[in-house]
């Protein structure tokens, strides 16, 4: 019988165990702060194992640091005694039913660092893609606090820039906004979150982080340290439209940094990224119109197609493919190079189909051998010039080249997403929301597969959820999301500009209409409800069984009384008024979710309630886990649960009808062990 921990993983302890497995002699014992013996690392011995020449203290080295970096790093590893509690009344079913609880998507309210720590053990190596849009540290006024600038005096104290006589050695303020005073708190905020987030990614996983020029340099260095410089993929540049509020240069782009979890795994498994070219639908629509107009007059179609491409506005995605302006019976194509890349290709004679004379051979040689080229000619895939003096070309059909390597630079008008969201919500509720179509593109080209998880722990307006809906429909697969957002208060006081106040008033009005508290989570949940419904309506039958729901979970203190975690502080007086080790305001479903976290069961797993021998029993993932938290549980209840052959069986010690039940617990389970191993746990 196993006693459940019911708390987040001790990351440091786990790392010590890993080092002990590799270098046993580098692990020793010491007396910890609590007076008990504990394992510890002998760093002198470990350094000797890892380097022939140990760096001396103070020796110059390449590093990226800032005040309190060590504290931020330790913060990532500190365990928390917190849990996630389910809220059915806020949840939405797979089909959009309010209060439904069968969705495999999760919307979690709470501080994202604490939430990540609570989730870490359960979702270790299970998330395919992370997209986040953290605060940009601009200092601008938003509905939420986006300014992490530290106080001047606080920065001086943290930097210790005074000499022994109390004189200021240098003035950080003299360097303006580029100075660390404006970056330190932001780095201390983002560092532990990214450090924990890395543990969630699958071996072929990837993280995308939106940022602007204020912190892009620091973020790049930070990610090189956390994810490894060799896992850096690219710095995507999103041109979002011209801004006219600058005195010198109109900075009209943002960045998206992307990193692999394990670039070596990607290479070894020959994983590549491709995305469907943008604007194809418009091109095909125009082509069909011209076919109806001109029939088989290909020259006329080509002429009008070129005119159409030229008339497209700058930034239109179809304009990138304007070289596809030739037409034949197969469709649209462009005349591609038929020579060997880099030179050294085979050279042989090819006759012109009209003149019968040998055509000019490409200086780099033909792209293929003579037999293949002749097959292409017979299949009308080679385009000859008017005479043999022209080098032929190969017909590259648009239908056969719809996918390409994603570009690192792309244009997408940032105002369009704001307009679409305002239309969806009935008014403008968020300043500068991320574009759901951009995130959809990223989800699709990075290789997200059926059943994969996409996570966003700075979820804001809930854009990522809408992107998951759209990508699931377009790729005809099931993609799950985990969104995390702090319950930030919406108030006009948080915005000084009238524009920001107007947005806040609209958000507050919607909250009042819905009868919910004035916070970002409530607006985001409503946005996801509406976005899911719209996505399903727009897609029609193509939506299939799209899961447009989400389970709402909220971060809270542990379900367990403090004495559960501190038995060494137990005193008989603590028993006064204490029925058991569970807090009195917690439900069986609250306990179930903490048990699922402890056992590493995804919180999106199927949950059913059964009545077994007169007791309420939770069945998770088709009896993979059976849990009963009722009182007066007897041997009959345990035996009937065991007959269902769960992998895990859980009861409370306070649930047992008497001591005999607990004494016979393992014996009852053992009688079914010949059919399947059942692991028993007790709270």
Image (tube, grey):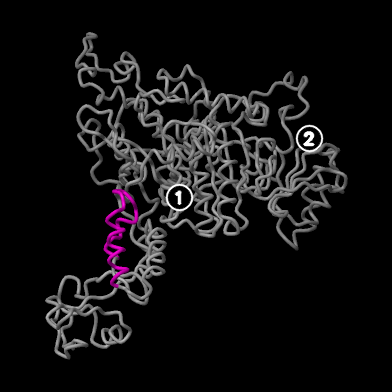
| Tag 1 secondary structure | helix
- Where disc 2 sits, the SS reads helix
Main secondary-structure element of the magenta-colored stretch: helix
- Please name whichever residue, 531 or 221, is drawn nearer the observer in this view of the structure: 531
Query: Is 9 included in the stretch rendered in magenta?
Result: no
Boundaries of the magenta span? 299-324
Q: Quadrant of residue 270?
A: bottom left
Marks 1 and 2, Cα distance to the nearest angstrom?
A: 49 Å
Look at the picture and state if 25 lies above or below 8: below
Q: Which residue is mark 2?
A: 654
Q: Report the residue at 55% width, 43% height from top.
A: 531
State the residue at coordinates (47%, 23%).
502
Identify the residue at image location x=16%, y=87%: 348
Residue tagged by mark 1? 440
In the image, residue 668 above or below residue 663: below
Q: Residue 496's spot in the image, x, y percent?
A: 41, 17
Q: Residue 313's spot in the image, x, y percent?
A: 30, 49
- Name the residue furthest front: 293
Residue 465: x %, y % from top left: 52, 44
Pick the front one: 99 or 515 = 515
Mark count: 2
């Amino acid at each position: 019988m196993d006693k459940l921990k019911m708390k987040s993983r001790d990351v440091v302890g786990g790392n010590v165990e890993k080092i002990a497995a590799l270098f046993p002699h580098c692990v020793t014992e010491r007396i910890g702060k609590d007076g008990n013996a504990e394992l510890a690392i002998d760093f002198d011995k470990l350094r000797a194992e890892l380097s022939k020449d140990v760096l001396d203290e103070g020796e110059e080295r390449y590093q990226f640091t800032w005040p309190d970096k060590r504290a931020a790093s330790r913060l990532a590893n500190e365990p928390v005694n917190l849990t996630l509690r389910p809220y059915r009344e806020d949840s939405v079913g797979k089909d959009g039913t309010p209060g439904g609880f069968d969705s495999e998507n999760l919307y979690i309210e709470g501080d994202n660092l604490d939430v990540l720590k609570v989730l870490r053990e359960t979702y270790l190596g299970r998330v395919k893609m992370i997209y986040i849009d953290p605060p940009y540290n601009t200092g601008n006024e938003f509905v939420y606090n986006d300014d992490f600038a530290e106080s001047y005096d606080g920065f001086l104290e943290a930097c210790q820039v005074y000499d022994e006589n109390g004189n200021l050695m240098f003035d950080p303020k003299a360097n303006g906004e580029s100075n660390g005073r404006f970056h330190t708190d932001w780095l201390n905020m983002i560092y532990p979150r990214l450090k924990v987030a890395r543990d969630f990614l699958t071996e072929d996983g990837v993280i995308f982080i939106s940022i602007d020029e204020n912190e892009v340099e620091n973020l790049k260095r930070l990610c090189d340290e956390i994810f490894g410089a060799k896992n850096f993929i690219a710095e995507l540049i999103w041109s979002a439209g011209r801004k006219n509020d600058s005195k010198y240069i109109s900075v009209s782009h943002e960045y998206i940094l992307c990193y692999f979890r394990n670039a070596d795994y990607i290479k070894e498994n020959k994983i590549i990224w491709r995305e469907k070219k943008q604007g194809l639908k418009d091109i095909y629509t125009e082509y069909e119109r011209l076919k109806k107009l001109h029939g088989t007059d290909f020259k006329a179609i080509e002429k009008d197609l070129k005119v159409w491409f030229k008339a497209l506005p700058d930034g239109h995605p179809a304009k990138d493919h304007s070289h596809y302006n030739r037409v034949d019976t197969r469709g649209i194509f462009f005349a591609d190079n038929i020579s060997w890349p880099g030179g050294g290709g085979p050279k042989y004679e090819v006759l012109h189909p009209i003149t019968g004379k040998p055509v000019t051979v490409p200086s780099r040689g033909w792209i293929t051998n003579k037999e293949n080229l002749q097959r292409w000619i017979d299949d009308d895939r080679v385009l000859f010039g008017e005479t043999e003096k022209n080098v032929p070309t190969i017909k590259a059909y648009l239908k056969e080249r719809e996918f390409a390597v994603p570009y690192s630079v792309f244009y997408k008008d940032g105002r369009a997403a704001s307009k679409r969201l305002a239309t969806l919500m009935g008014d403008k509720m968020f300043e500068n929301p991320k574009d759901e179509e951009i995130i959809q593109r990223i989800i699709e080209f990075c290789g997200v597969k059926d059943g994969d998880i996409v996570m966003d722990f700075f979820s804001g307006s809930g854009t990522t959820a809408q992107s998951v809906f759209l990508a699931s429909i377009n790729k005809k697969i099931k993609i799950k999301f985990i969104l995390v957002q702090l319950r930030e208060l919406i108030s006009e006081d948080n915005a000084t500009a009238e524009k920001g106040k107007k947005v806040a008033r609209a958000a507050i009005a919607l909250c009042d209409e819905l009868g919910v508290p004035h916070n970002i989570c409530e607006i985001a949940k409503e946005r996801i409800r509406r976005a899911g419904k719209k996505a399903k309506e727009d897609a029609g039958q193509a939506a299939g069984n799209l899961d447009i729901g989400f389970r709402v979970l909220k971060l809270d203190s542990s379900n367990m009384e403090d004495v559960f975690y501190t038995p060494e502080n137990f005193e008989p007086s603590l028993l006064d008024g204490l029925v058991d080790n569970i807090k009195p305001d917690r439900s069986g479903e609250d306990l179930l979710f903490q048990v699922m976290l402890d056992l590493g069961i995804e919180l999106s797993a199927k949950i059913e309630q059964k009545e077994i021998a007169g007791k309420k029993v939770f069945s998770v993932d088709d009896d993979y886990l059976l849990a009963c938290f009722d009182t007066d549980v007897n041997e009959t209840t345990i035996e009937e649960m065991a007959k269902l052959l769960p992998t895990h069986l859980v009861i409370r010690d306070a649930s047992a009808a008497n001591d005999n039940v607990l004494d016979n617990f393992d014996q009852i389970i053992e009688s079914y062990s010949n059919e399947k191993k059942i692991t028993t746990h007790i709270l």
